[in-house]
Structures are given as structure tokens and as C-alpha cells.
């Protein structure tokens, strides 16, 4: 791979962050502008009822997780448990992850992004995460050496994600099978209990990687 990464074929559909308003009741979590302990910052998109977010944060107190869920009833279940567990290294956010990320996350700031069992979007493949122009923006928020973890039980979703990672996003990735004993999320528990195969894709951001959003951020988070 060279530094001549070619994302220009995405140009017609380039993501337009400036067109997205901040989510309703938007508040920037303290960790964004005040990460005193320099904890690695992680983002979970589509956290559901928060099973992964709650156990990950409890087990990784040296890291800070922001977990976003859009669906109100799922978020409410997550939020109740998060309040009970009272973890200082977890922010549970009720929002659309796209608008929220645009308004809250600095470039080159995330150590890891979890996308665990995303909606299949089989009838609307443009909404699959690696097919979206937003994915370039998401990559701009990842640190060099940072990782995107995508997990799904749908083989065609994984085949496409792996293909897009290589062909569109010019990124190295590793695909593996989720161990049958894994229990990270409610969906994972359900699929593995049915003895379905679940797939995991790990995508790493190399040193040479550039996106068109590397210098783009909203003014409210202006200090880097
Ligand atoms: C199939 S569920 C999986 C939930 C959880 N990760 C699990 O594995 O149990 C996908 C979740 O992603 C959420 N979601 C989809 N698009 C989203 C977005 N743009 N922002 C935030 N959440 C989103 C949905 O509301 C849904 O709860």
C-alpha cells in the first residue's frame, strides 16, 4: 500500500458532514475535551440494550467507551442498567450515531470502533455501514493503528464488508469466526445458541491512511 490512496471514486457520493444538524438535546461528553488520564477512547455504534458496553466498560476501566443506540426502548433499557452500574468510563448516548459522531468526535481520536450485529439492511444495502459515504468520515475519527470491529451472522453482509474494506476503503482487514462460547451481545447469544456462524472483521488504520475529513471538525470541539 502507498500513500496514494484513491477515494476519488467515492467523490460523487462524498459524505457531507456540514449538512448534518446536531442531535436533539446534544451535549458533548466531558471525555471529549477533558481526557485527563489519556484513556483510549472507544465508540460502539448500535449498542442495543448495552450488554457489550456494560461488560466491556466494567472489565476495561483503563479505557473509555461511548456507546450509542438510536432506538428509544432499547436505549432506555441500556440507560437504566448504566445508571445502576454507574461506570465513570462509559457514556450511554441516545442518538443517531452518524449525526452524533459528526458533532462530537475529533479526528484521529478513537482507538477502536465496535459495530456489533448491525441491522442487515438486505433490502437497502446502501445503509450497510461499509457501503455508506459516512464510513470515510468514521475512518477519519480513528487513530493511526486504530481498529474497527464489525461482527455479523449474515455471511453476505460479511462478504460485502470484507470486499468494501479492500476495494473501496483500501484497508487491510482480517476475518475470523466468533467462538461458539462468546456472549458479548444479546444478538450474539441468540445466534450462537442457534448454532449459527458469526463472523468478525477487524480493520486497522495504517500510518499512511488519509481521508478527506482528517482536518474537519465542528467548532464546539475545536481544540485538538
Ligand atoms: C441488530 S441490533 C444489534 C444490537 C446489539 N449490538 C446486539 O448485538 O445485541 C442493531 C442496533 O443498531 C441500532 N442502530 C442502527 N443504526 C443506528 C444508528 N445510525 N445510530 C445508532 N444506532 C443505530 C439499532 O437501533 C439496533 O438496536
Image (spheres, helix red, strand yellow):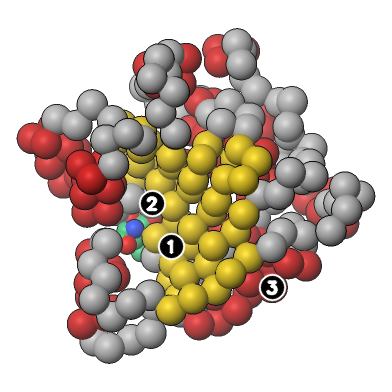
Disc 2 designates what residue?
46
180 vs 142: above or below: below
Disc 3 designates what residue?
163
- Residue pictured at 48% horizontal, 48% vertical: 113
Q: Nearer the viewer, residue 156 or 176?
A: 176
Estimate the x, y position of residue 110 in percent, counting from the top left: 53, 37
Q: Would the CB of label 1 be found within 8 Å of ligand 1?
A: yes
Foreground disc of the pair 3, 2: 3
Drawn side of residue 15 relative to residue 173, left or right: right
| Quadrant of the image occupied by residue 79 | top left
Drawn side of residue 37 relative to residue 16, left or right: left
| Quadrant of the image occupied by residue 36 | top left
- Mark 1 vs mark 3: which is more N-terminal? 1
The answer, for residue 126, to whether it is visible in the render is no
Q: Secondary structure at mark 1?
A: loop
Q: Secondary structure at mark 3?
A: helix
- Residue pictured at 73% horizontal, 32% vertical: 214
Which of the numbered marks, if any, corresponds to residue 118? 1
Q: Would the CB of label 2 be found within 8 Å of ligand 1?
A: yes
Q: Secondary structure at mark 2?
A: loop
Amino acid at each position: 500500500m502507498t500513500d496514494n490512496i484513491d477515494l476519488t471514486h467515492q467523490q460523487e457520493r462524498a459524505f457531507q458532514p456540514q449538512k448534518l444538524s446536531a442531535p436533539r438535546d446534544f451535549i458533548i461528553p466531558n471525555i471529549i475535551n477533558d481526557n485527563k488520564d489519556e484513556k483510549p477512547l472507544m465508540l460502539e455504534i448500535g449498542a442495543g440494550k448495552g450488554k457489550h458496553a456494560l461488560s466491556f466498560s466494567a472489565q476495561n476501566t483503563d479505557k473509555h467507551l461511548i456507546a450509542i443506540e438510536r432506538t428509544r426502548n432499547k436505549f432506555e433499557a441500556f440507560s437504566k442498567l448504566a445508571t445502576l452500574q454507574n461506570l465513570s468510563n462509559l457514556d450511554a448516548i441516545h442518538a443517531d450515531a452518524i449525526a452524533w459522531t459528526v458533532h462530537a468526535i475529533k479526528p484521529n481520536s478513537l482507538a477502536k470502533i465496535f459495530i456489533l450485529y448491525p441491522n442487515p439492511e438486505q433490502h437497502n444495502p446502501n445503509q450497510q455501514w461499509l457501503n455508506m459515504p459516512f464510513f470515510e468520515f468514521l475512518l477519519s475519527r480513528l487513530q493511526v493503528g486504530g481498529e474497527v470491529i464489525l461482527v455479523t451472522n449474515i455471511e453476505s453482509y460479511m462478504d460485502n464488508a470484507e470486499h468494501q474494506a479492500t476495494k473501496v476503503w483500501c484497508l487491510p482487514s482480517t476475518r475470523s469466526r466468533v467462538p461458539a462460547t462468546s456472549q458479548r451481545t444479546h444478538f450474539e447469544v441468540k445466534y450462537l445458541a442457534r448454532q449459527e456462524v458469526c463472523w468478525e472483521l477487524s480493520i486497522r488504520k495504517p500510518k499512511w491512511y488519509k481521508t478527506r475529513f482528517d482536518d474537519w471538525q465542528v467548532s464546539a470541539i475545536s481544540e485538538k
